[in-house]
Image (spheres, rainbow, N blue to C red):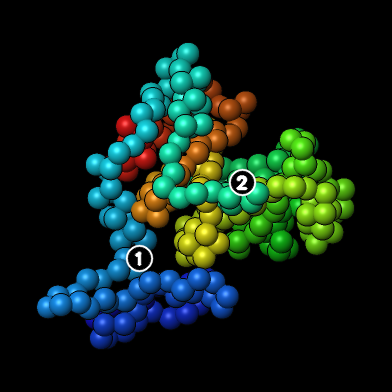
Amino acid sequence: GGGGYDGPAGGGGGGSGSGGGLSSTPGSPPRTGGTQKGGSGSTAAPATAAALVAAAEEQAAAPAINMNMDGEEGEDDEFFDGMAAMPTDQEIDGADVRVAMIGNVDSGKSTLIGVLTNATLDDGRGLARSTVLRHRHEQENGRTSAVSVEIMGYKEGKQVIPQARQQNQRWAEVVEESDRAITLIDLCGHEKYLKTTVFGLTGMMPDMALLVVGANMGVQVMTREHISIACALQLPIAVVVTKVDICPQPVLKTTRQVHGTQHRVHGSWS
């Protein structure tokens, strides 16, 4: 029998038989799932997060970018130069680049999107993320529970800063005044909403993933899960380390070392 995997819209899992697989919401590209029969045998497509992790581990031997994340002083230039040269197997449309924000809960993904799209710093009390989070409970606890999208527009190399507070009005300003855009997809970091994050990484079809790591939190379980899933989907990964101003240097060094080890394990760099 093939177990199913519920999407955010709550499509049920498979029971007995050969059915099951990733479900998709209306309007999203169909997802491949269930059992594929061919010849005398059959192969089952990954249907759970655990299967995605296993698929990512099988890619550890794939060609990867050479980067050093040992956390030694004086290596930051090499680290960011490597990120700029990160390879991708797919063409990215320069007029609209889609970036999925991944990482553990409370690492600062929504705040980072708010800071980038408004070109202003956060006040430490959730001001930046208030334009990104959509639901009341998200505003109250500061944790994303649904896929949210924001856009950054550029015209002749300069960012277009919207002045309106309403999302539709902000988007209208950006679209009308920009000649190219970056779509930032805010995904959930809490384990409870992992299915929603998987949907965002598949149904929203991002060109790359931006992994946000809280320096003072280290590499948590969900950080590892998100790295595994992004690698299984063959998404290029860039890394942002947040909260370095409140993190002791020894903790920051450990975070960088552990984080680098995780990427080497999954083959995202060597």
Q: Residue at x 53, y 54 (%)?
A: 206
Which disc is residue 240 wearing?
none
According to the picture, the residue beneath numbered tag 1 turns out to be 48
Q: Which three-letter amino acid code belongs to the residue tagged 1?
A: Thr
Q: Callout 2: helix, strand or loop?
A: loop
- Residue at 47 percent across and 42 percent down: it is 237
Q: Nearer the viewer, mark 2 or mark 1?
A: 2
In the picture, measured across the screen, residue 181 lies left or right of residue 175, that is left
Q: Closer to the camera, 16 or 264? A: 264
Give residue 111's quadrant in the image: top right
The residue shown at (60%, 32%) is: 243
Image coordinates of residue 189 in percent, x first then y, are 53, 52
Q: Which residue is mark 2?
A: 94
N-terminal label among 2 and 1: 1
Q: Amino acid at mark 2?
A: Gly
Q: Is residue 81 above or below residue 204?
A: above
**Residue at the extreme left of the image, as rendered:** 40
Quadrant where the N terminus lies? bottom left
- At mark 1, the secondary structure is loop
